[in-house]
Image: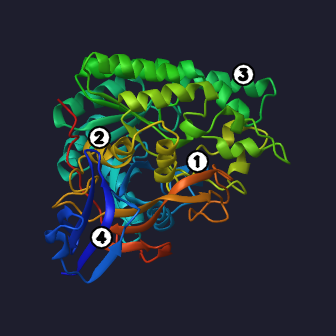
Amino acid sequence: MPRTVIRGGLVITAAEEVHADVLVEGERIVALAATGSSAAQAWTADTEYDATGRYVIPGGVDAHTHMELPFGGTAASDTFETGTRAAAWGGTTTIVDFAVQSVGHSLRDGLDTWHAKAEGNCAIDYGLHMIMSDVTEDTLKEMDILVEEGVTSFKLFMAYPGVFYSDDGRILRAMQRSAGNGGLIMMHAENGIAIDVLVEQALAAGRTDPRYHGEVRRDLLEAEATHRAIQLARVAGAPLYVVHVSAEQAVAELAHARDLGLNVFGETCPQYLYLSTDNLAEYGEDGFEGAKYVCSTPLRPREHQAALWRALRTNDLSVVSTDHCPFCFTGQKELGRGDFSKIPNGLPGVENRMDLLHQAVVDGHISRRRWIELACATPARMFGLYPRKGTISPGADADIVIFDPHERYTMSAATHHMNVDYSAYEGRQVTGRARTVLSRGSAVIEEGEYRGRAGHGTYLPRGTSQYLH
């Protein structure tokens, strides 16, 4: 088996920081030894990387992406090939994407469709969650089978009536099933029924610009749905993971539930930490610039950001994922000109997450180990992939990033690798960048050159969440 040694770096995991060399054989990490020690000096290898002055960190685990997602008459612009390549450029070596069950079809149909999209096309490893759009006696039984096969998380929507929406009764049934089979319910918590009323009223009053997307999807309706999801999970005795939390009031609901000792977890995304309704209100040259920033849950006023950062420090928010769901401004976001409700919901971000979270370390929001915890270790544990993913230890997959904490660069659509014609972070300067990225021991990125290939990435059946008590 080919042997690789990474020498001289600061190895950072969620648990510790240590100056160590890392030995890789084939696809796995086999040993760590103190830099300069006789054990490390005795290692020979086919490939050596000098990580002096750099961090050696686990590859990022992005547990919330939407490659090729059909939405609003179009589809997300990143394929599994382009999206996983972009993820690798940003130091992410595992994604968990969402297979979609269509109403009237089985979970299996949706899963098979997503396997067909991903298989042979991914540059990095991938798992799948299951979106349940149609909770029936048959699909409830299918949940048990999927958990046994390694699809151990199921996403339900309190938003998007007529598309993904489930009412409280269906949600309760799915939660009861997951309480029995060990699966984890993921919730898009927004009161979609009430939001639709506000959308209709805004459009009738001539309020059609992108900024009204944020105004109708009220923070209180995110908080209300989060509260309701938590209570339903308590009734069912089921764990709950609330995705893309953006509002301070929703964070408060999660914090209260966790103070009660419940198996309730929250995720946020970089867009809610760095962007705001100021972006949604951008008019640009053609009055429609804000459409680039339409996602759901929506961006909030800047004042919400402090609560999100605080929750990331206290663990009331446990994971930072991207909800990567890109739509090009030209030809896709433009579908909503004159009607904000027709703008496809989603932002590009899979390439930016690791660097934006390192910027949070630079800015003093979080520690280095917390960065790795939020971006690598906790998502791997939450979704049954740890310690194969999310850490640097003997036996783990050799998903390793050599990260330069000093390199400064400017984020831009001109230089990113996502298949989308704008950057949500255009012009933002950040400090720190992935320079070399190994996926299962193979170089995907090497000193800023792409070395990967479609089909290297393999499908990951997952265990159940490692946080449930």
The residue to which callout 3 is attached is 201
Q: Earlier in the sequence, mark 3 or mark 2?
A: 2
CA–CA distance between discs 3 and 2? 36 Å
Residue 186 sits in quarter: top left
Residue under pointer 1: 347
Name the element at disc 1: loop
Q: Find residue 371 and report its horizontal and vertical position in percent.
A: 39, 44
Q: What residue type is labelled 4?
A: Ile
In-image side of 83 versus 236 (left or right): right
The residues tagged by marks 2 and 1 sit, at their Cα atoms, a distance apart of: 30 Å
Image quadrant holding the N terminus, namely bottom left
Inspect the image, locate mark 2, and give the three-letter code of the amino acid beneath it.
Thr
Label 1 – label 4 distance at C-alpha? 35 Å
Q: Quadrant of residue 415?
A: bottom right
Q: Is residue 101 above or below residue 199?
A: below
Disc number placed over residue 6 in the picture, else none: 4
Q: Is residue 96 above or below residue 266?
A: below
- Amino acid type of the residue tagged 1 in the rendering: Leu
Instruction: Tell me how far mark 1 sits from mark 3, CA to CA.
Output: 26 Å
- Tell me residue 330's x, y (percent): 73, 57
- From the viewer's side, name the closer residue of 382 and 435: 435
